[in-house]
Amino acid sequence: MSAFLTLLFRNRLAALGAVVIMAILILVLNIPLLPLHDPDVTATADRFMRPFAEGHLLGTDHLGRDLLSRLLHGTRLSLAVGIAAALIAAAIGSAIGIFAGYFGGRTDNIVMRGVDMLMAFPYILLALAIVAALGPGLMNALIAVAAVNVPFFARNIRGITVGLAGREFVDAARLAGMGHTRIVLTELLPNVLPVIVIAMSTTVGWMILETAGLSFLGLGSQPPQADLGSMLGEARSAMISHPHTSIVPGLMIFLIVVSINLLGDGVRDALDPRLRSGALSRPRATTLVKRHGDVPPTTDDLLAIQDLHTEFHVGKRNLRAVDGVSLAVKPGECLGVIGESGSGKSVTALSVMGLVASPPGVITGGAVRFQGEDLIGAPYESLRQKRGDRVAYIFQDPLSTLHPLYRVGQQLAEAIRSHDSLSKAETRARAIELLNDVRIPNAKSRVDDYPHEMSGGMRQRVGIAMALANEPDVIIADEPTTALDVTVQAQILSLLDDLRRERGLAIIFITHDFGVVAQLCDRVAVMYAGRIVEEGPTQAVLDAPAHPYTKRLIACVPELGGGRRELAAIPGLPPVLDDLPSGCAFAPRCNKAAKSCRQGEIPLQGPALRTVRCLFPERTL
Amino acid sequence: MPALKIEHLAKTYPRKRPLFGAAPPGVRAVRPMSFQVETGETLGVVGESGCGKSTLARMLVGLLEPTEGTIEIEGKALGTADPSEFGKLIQYVFQDPQSSLNPRKTIRQVMEAPLKRLHGMAKPARNRRIAEIFASVKLREEFLDRYPHEFSGGQAQRIGIARALAASPRIIILDEPVSALDVSVQAQVLNLLADLKTRFGLTYLFITHDLAVVEAVSERIVVLYFGAVVEIGRADRIFANPRHPYTGLLAESAPVVGRSLAAPEQKGIELPDPLNPPPGCAFAGRCPRATDLCRTREPELKQMGEDQLAACHYPLEN
């Protein structure tokens, strides 16, 4: 709760709205204590007194009634009616939405078409019709406003419920023997409640306006009872001669609605899970660079990552995702990077082209050199020119990297033309050629497919074709086959292998699968907790791992043909990045750890190209 | 008596009827299939995406009503799909441990549901049972009052397993239970599952796409392709001596340390279209041995050698 309030009040406008609405609420709740005139006592002799007149701070209206008193009583009534209408609409609308969304199918169809019909009427007409049928009066206006707003809640909540009802925890609840009512009340309702609150906070202001509108037309509160709408309605005839009688209630409506809407927007932003992480602003075009220390000197590798440090600054926490990683590839070479989630392998890859989202990502040290040129801190335009052109990426899930609304040919064309100025026909020919290169059968007709018309393997081929579009020198592939079936994976791997042999491509291949690394990569680097713990030629590392982590990781992965057996598990969990132990990060899970492992820096050492970061390696290198 | 016996179990999803004319034939997600799982056995179910693994699993636990066929658990036939009737006999462990836990419930509330609803236990009995189960899945009891987002994937999956155990089922369906976990945690969970099986005398149906994992944990393996069983055999033999060409293709495609990289299928082959299924064997389009017979007549599951069955007109030789 306190976290929610901090987040809410970080938004200055929401804080302003909260202050104004709280002030108004305190004022109207304390009416009995305030020295006010009776709002309904007329005194025709004192009619249309100006504000700041003696005894009447805001003046009097056309019947000589005290405006301040009527304003506060009216505000109290309007707020009460507006909030009550919002609560009723939210309760009924959400109930309909949850019911329709949970049961789905025909129930959903019938209920929601009914709701659609209600929405087809202009709201004021519908409200007028309801009041006409029930007769004028504040209670009936309340019913009308609530009824008019039911569809808004029903549709919103149904959408959320449909998504939730398909989630696995609802299946789990059914398997635990829960009935429909119990599932709706204990599984679904708590999860849609924030959405209901958000929808309510953004509509209360609107409902107060609608109630005022009905009262203005004389269908809401009846004289002499004051509410903001009827005060405006009564003042209408004297608007020119005595403007203060309409300005006073008008300003109050304005203040209430603006402050409630500002607060409502703030509540929505603070409850929205996407904004909660602190990423309130759009990420920058390149990762923020704040380098400390010296920049390492140039090497003659094609792409060299040198002592790279990338951190995530989330609130007060500093997550050291990449902590001094050095890697290098030469043309035609394939380097495998192995690690578990949180080991920093993907962040290393994204740091190369400044693609780590900032905020919260910050590159705090090291260099990334492409043909000797430092890319860290390079101007955006120079990075943009190299992205896709010299260094290209292939990501894990081709369905989320391809735009669903464009044909694959168009997306390939976009990739080609962002770096090359070719004519339309030439671009299309090039796109077809690329699809041929990645062995998509029938490339000529496939170029006009949408991503959803292709299988997962085909889509990943398109992803590879896009990466190849500008004949890059380096491809960084981040788990490109993890989401694919084994038979498709085998095809994609052999395609990548052919491409690097034919074109001299350098590949950095990120994965968690030793089998894949063994088949594709020349060298492999093993990462743990943001650091490289072992590096060397693939065969050497797999046959004779030197770091205890590598050895045990290999042992705990079952291998086809090994038969039924007990697996050698690694106890414990990977460390949390903002609380890394000093010394070796693997020490708490290692059976060989000694006291010296838990203090001081342990260097990555060994003969050239075969290194390990361990005081007690499994074998000497 | 087998722990689980299914006969001619099938699921067809109806398709939308067009404005004019008759409804098109439905999508056959699971074609009629029969097999049984012995008590105490782990039966692996392997297949690629879209082969009907998950549909089969959901029918077995009563989350989905089968179009035809019967499900028998320990000789007792289960009628209509009703998870609360199924729940006491057969439970489910989900692939994604996080999304199978309600984010707004504490672990204790999650654990209590099956005990209260399925077994009607009173509060003290429930607390004793939860403590017992938590000890057996090696979780600390202080976790009970926390919310799911506070747990790592491996811990959340243990909670998922603990919840399944709470119903005291005879059979547990494990639907890709380790594929969302890190490799170093996978082995912990697999070993825990093996340990629980012997301790509670459970029977497992282990669904996965990972051949190495399924081989390491199962006694027998069923290979699915396009909604049908193409091969059943002993885990230690089926990938070494496949009879169906598809099983062979799977085994050759799995990345193995020490085997050089060569795609067993060079052509970019599209899978059969479920809306427009091919006549005959569904694998014929990808099969190098296919003849006209394969393209016209669907092969039946036949005994091939000792305890191995395959559905192929021209099976591979040993």
Image: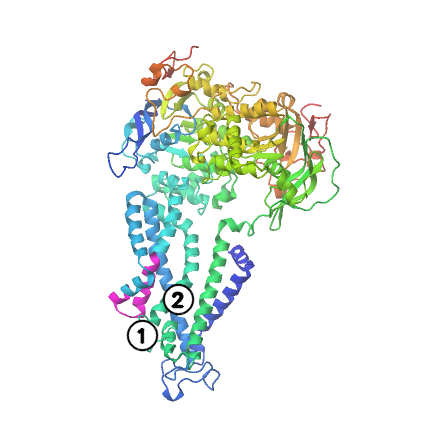
Residue B311 sits above or below residue A571 on the image: above
The image quadrant where one finds the C terminus of chain A is top right
Magenta segment, prevailing SS (helix, strand or loop): helix
Which badge, 2 or 1, comes first in the chain's sequence? 2
> What amino acid does circle 2 point to?
Leu
Nearer to me, A252 or B72: A252
Query: Which chain letter matches label 2?
Result: A
Label 2 or label 1, whichever lies nearer to me, is: 2
Chain identity of mark 1: A
Residue B122: say if magenta: no
Q: Which residue is mark 2?
A: A209
Label 1: which secondary element: loop
Image colouring? rainbow
User: Marks 2 and 1, how far apart in space?
Assistant: 17 Å
User: Dot 2 lies on which element?
Assistant: helix
Which region shows up in magenta?
A130-150
Would you name the residue on which mark 1 appears? A222
2 and 1 marks in contact (CB < 8 Å): no
The answer to whether residue A540 is seen in the rendering is yes
Tally the numbered discs: 2
- Residue at x-position 24% and y-position 65%: A133
Which amino acid, mark 1?
A: Gln
Along the viewing direction, whichever of A54 and B18 lies nearer the viewer: B18
* Residue pictured at 30% horizontal, 46% vertical: A109
The image quadrant of residue B117 is: top left
Locate residue A572, reporting x and y percent: 57, 34
Label 1 crowd (10 A; few <14 / some 14-19 / many >=20): some
Vertical relation: A47 (above or below) B230? below
